[in-house]
């Protein structure tokens, strides 16, 4: 779960900071920004809290809680862009 959210946030950063020509330096810079910003720590803290809460409620039968949490975290840590008036 953490890898999926981290990767998505890093790819989001790369998409926003490059004009389509991505170099290895761009990727490394995005990864360094991700770690240096504290986002990785916050994301993984949110995931640990989620796992503890999920085990505490003993896996309610309400859909896929893990997938729902991944979506919440990606929406929280990736800023939406507006394309042609759509967000």
Image (spheres, rainbow, N blue to C red):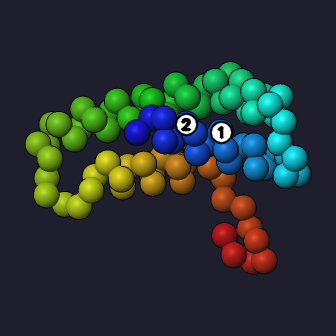
Q: Secondary structure at mark 2?
A: helix
Residue 46, x across and y down, in percent: 41, 35
Q: Residue at x 75, y 43 (%)?
A: 14
Q: Relative to the observer, which residue lies in front, 30 or 78?
A: 30
Residue 7, x across and y down, in percent: 57, 39
Q: Relative to the observer, which residue lies in front, 77 or 9?
A: 9
Q: Relative to the observer, which residue lies in front, 4 or 69?
A: 4
Q: Give how far apart the Cα atoms at labels 1 and 2 are.
A: 6 Å
Quarter location, residue 1: top left
Vertical order, 63 against 86 (above or below): above
Residue 19 can be seen in this image = yes
- Left/right of residue 82 with respect to residue 59 in the rendered view: right
**CB within 8 Å, label 1 to label 2:** yes
Q: Residue at x 45, y 52 (%)?
A: 72
Q: Which residue is mark 2?
A: 6
Q: Secondary structure at mark 1?
A: helix
Q: Which mark is residue 10?
A: 1
Quarter location, residue 28: top right
Q: Residues within 10 Å of mark 2 (few under 14, many from 20)?
A: many
Q: Residues within 10 Å of mark 1 (few under 14, many from 20)?
A: many
Q: Across the whole image, how many numbered discs are drawn on residues?
A: 2
Residue 79, x across and y down, in percent: 66, 52
């Amino acid at each position: 779960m953490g890898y999926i959210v981290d990767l998505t946030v890093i790819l989001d950063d790369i998409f926003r900071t490059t004009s389509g020509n991505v170099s290895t330096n761009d990727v490394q810079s995005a990864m360094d920004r991700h770690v240096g910003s504290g986002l990785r720590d916050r994301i993984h803290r949110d995931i640990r809290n989620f796992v503890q809460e999920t085990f505490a409620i003993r896996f309610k039968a309400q859909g896929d809680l893990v997938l729902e949490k991944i979506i919440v975290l990606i929406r929280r840590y990736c800023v939406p862009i507006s394309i042609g008036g759509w967000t």
